[in-house]
Image: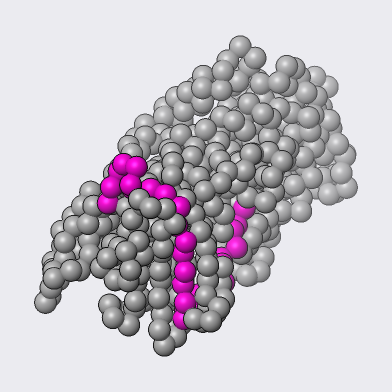
């Protein structure tokens, strides 16, 4: 596909047992605001409500956008249409996928977009699609819409409604969508809005509303019908949303109904991708960046950052990106994965013909070794981390690759100077001289000298952006930047240049956003 830290002994320990998740978040936020004063890790995005807007077009007036309660015009990520949980977009914490069946109670009903997906198939008049529902107690997803009846006019739709999603691929000789009431009072209004991924659902972006009809306007009383051969044809191969609604908000504005569709061919339902589900999204980031399962408090905190958006899709997109980027910025990753990166750089410099110092296959086991049993905020985590670091550096300097470069006969001065040069000379001369003196006098071991250079704050600052970009490939794509399908470092160089041009601001560079939305990343978890 395209800064500064301190070492563990000098860091403020954020997240000890006396601090809440919110305090931890605020502390991390403050540190990063100090680093990049013009941006914050989490931007506050106000909720937006779609208003009705009249637009003009050549030859005729264009209908206003449907008024959709609590929705934005902002494109969102592809939240799938295969599951029909109540208030799906309003309460993301209840978005339920198959792998969650033991974790969240199932919800019923057709409230809110995308509602129920109509199964794909051919539905001739002799074998139509049949469905049923009851809008009693449902949400008021769309409060008004525009229809053509001797000119465009507003149709009130203030009652509770149900939403169905589908894609037409073909129409037969007499295509119809019909809703019949099964109570003596409910008079349904039905209409179709054109939507589309990644647009909001319903789109509400000034596109035509197709055939909003009320009982008595076609067919017998109590039946609402869209006959596409008499009205304008419904478009093919674009997402559509059928709303079963009412223009009343009283006892006569809701009730049971039967849905019938004939002479239509509907595309197969799009399978959901589990990375779009909030809980799975957060859990996977713990696995990919911290090499462990999420702890309950951390999981709840980062999920809440997303679910607090409710149905504000722009907010959801921003919070997912910021949640994701924050895993690299976290103390836990900086003291484990980023330390492994700096260790390889100090020991061996950049790989031949490469802008990076470590491969994915080298990075993962060493990061896991440093991070073993480390869980920030768990009692004693600092000592566990310290023990892991000592063991890691002691083993590292005994590896054949290291001893072949830093032979036992090498002097203390040569040893320190070579490590320092590989790392880009971050050590000031007094510190460099002290390391040489300590190593030659036996006050420090080779492992301790390597660690001192790898943990040097100037090195951490200098390599921050390069490591950030490399972790996009390691964390999201689980490969080296020059592995297939890239085959070279062009993508890595592109994102590094872009991140540098925005002074490390991954939001403005849109780096995290690009990797999260990439087909390669999404294919790890679903279609």
Locate the C terminus by quadrant.
bottom right
Residue drawn at the location 72% of the way across and 31% of the way down = 451
Q: Residue at x 63, y 16 (%)?
A: 16
Residue most toward the bottom? 173
Task: Work out whether residue 227 or residue 288 is closer to the camera in this orientation and state it.
Answer: 227
Which quadrant of the rendered structure holds the N terminus?
A: bottom right
Which region shows up in magenta? 247-274
Seen as rendered, the residue at the extreme front is 184
> Is residue 521 shown to the viewer in this render?
no
Magenta includes 254?
A: yes
129 shown above or below 325: below
Please, is residue 165 above or below residue 429 in the view?
below
Which residue is more in the foreground, 92 or 412?
92
Residue at (60% x, 63% y) in the render: 271
Q: How many marks?
A: 0
The quadrant where residue 303 appears: top right
Tell me the quarter of the picture where residue 335 sits.
Answer: top right
219 and 60: which one is in front?
Answer: 219
Q: Is residue 193 left or right of residue 465?
A: left
Taking the view exactly as shown, the residue that stands out farthest to the left is 59
Percent position (x, y) of residue 122?
55, 79
Quarter of the image where one finds residue 100: top right
Whether residue 367 can be seen here? yes
Asked if the stretch drawn in magenta spans residue 255, the answer is yes
The image shows residue 204 at horizontal and vertical percentages of: 30, 57
* Residue drawn at (56%, 68%) of the image: 119
Tell me residue 364's x, y (percent): 75, 47
Q: Where in the figure is residue 217, as x and y percent of width and height?
A: 25, 68
> In this image, 233 relative to 412: left or right?
left
């Amino acid at each position: 596909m395209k800064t500064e830290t301190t070492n563990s002994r000098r860091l403020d320990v954020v997240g000890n047992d006396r601090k809440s998740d919110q305090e931890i978040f605020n502390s991390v936020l403050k540190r990063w605001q100090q680093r990049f004063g013009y941006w914050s890790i989490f931007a506050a995005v106000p909720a937006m409500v779609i208003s009705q807007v009249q637009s003009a077009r050549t030859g005729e007036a264009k209908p206003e956008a449907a008024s959709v309660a609590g929705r934005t015009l902002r494109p969102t990520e592809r939240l799938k249409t295969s599951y029909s949980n109540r208030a799906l977009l309003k309460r993301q914490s209840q978005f339920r996928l198959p792998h969650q069946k033991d974790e969240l109670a199932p919800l019923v009903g057709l409230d809110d977009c995308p509602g129920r997906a109509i199964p794909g198939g051919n539905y001739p008049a002799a074998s139509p699609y049949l469905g049923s529902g009851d809008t009693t107690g449902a949400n008021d997803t769309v409060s008004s819409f525009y229809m053509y009846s001797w000119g465009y006019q507003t149709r009130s739709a203030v009652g509770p409604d149900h939403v169905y999603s589908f894609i037409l691929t073909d129409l037969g000789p007499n295509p119809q969508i019909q809703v019949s009431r099964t109570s003596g009072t409910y008079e349904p209004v039905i209409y179709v809005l054109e939507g589309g991924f990644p647009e909001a659902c319903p789109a509400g972006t000034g596109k035509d509303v197709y055939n909003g009809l009320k009982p008595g306007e076609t067919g017998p009383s109590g039946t609402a019908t869209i006959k596409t051969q008499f009205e304008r044809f419904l478009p093919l191969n674009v997402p559509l949303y059928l709303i079963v609604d009412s223009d009343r908000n009283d006892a006569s504005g809701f009730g049971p109904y039967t849905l019938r569709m004939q002479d239509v061919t509907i595309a197969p339902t799009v399978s959901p991708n589990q990375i779009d589900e909030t809980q799975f999204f957060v859990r996977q980031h713990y696995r990919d960046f911290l090499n462990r399962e999420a702890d309950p408090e951390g999981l709840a905190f980062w999920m809440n950052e997303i679910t607090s958006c409710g149905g504000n899709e722009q907010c959801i997109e921003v919070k997912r990106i910021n949640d994701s980027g924050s895993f690299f910025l976290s103390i836990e990753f900086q003291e484990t994965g980023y330390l492994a990166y700096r260790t390889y750089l100090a020991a061996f410099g950049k790989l031949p013909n490469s802008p990076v110092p470590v491969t994915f296959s080298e990075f993962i086991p060493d990061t896991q070794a440093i991070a073993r049993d480390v869980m920030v905020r768990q009692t004693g985590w600092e000592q566990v981390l310290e023990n892991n670091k000592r063991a890691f550096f002691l083993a590292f300097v005994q590896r054949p690759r290291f001893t072949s470069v830093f032979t036992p006969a090498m002097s203390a001065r040569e040893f320190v100077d070579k490590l320092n040069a590989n790392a880009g000379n971050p050590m000031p001369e007094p510190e460099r001289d002290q390391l040489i003196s300590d190593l030659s006098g036996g006050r420090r071991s080779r492992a301790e000298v390597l660690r001192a250079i790898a943990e040097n704050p100037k090195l951490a600052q200098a390599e921050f952006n390069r490591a950030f970009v490399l972790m996009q490939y390691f964390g999201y794509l689980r490969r080296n930047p020059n592995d297939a399908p890239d085959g070279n470092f062009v993508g890595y160089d592109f994102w590094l240049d872009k991140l540098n041009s925005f002074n490390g601001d991954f939001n403005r560079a849109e780096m995290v956003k690009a990797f999260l939305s990439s087909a390669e990343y999404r294919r790890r978890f679903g279609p």
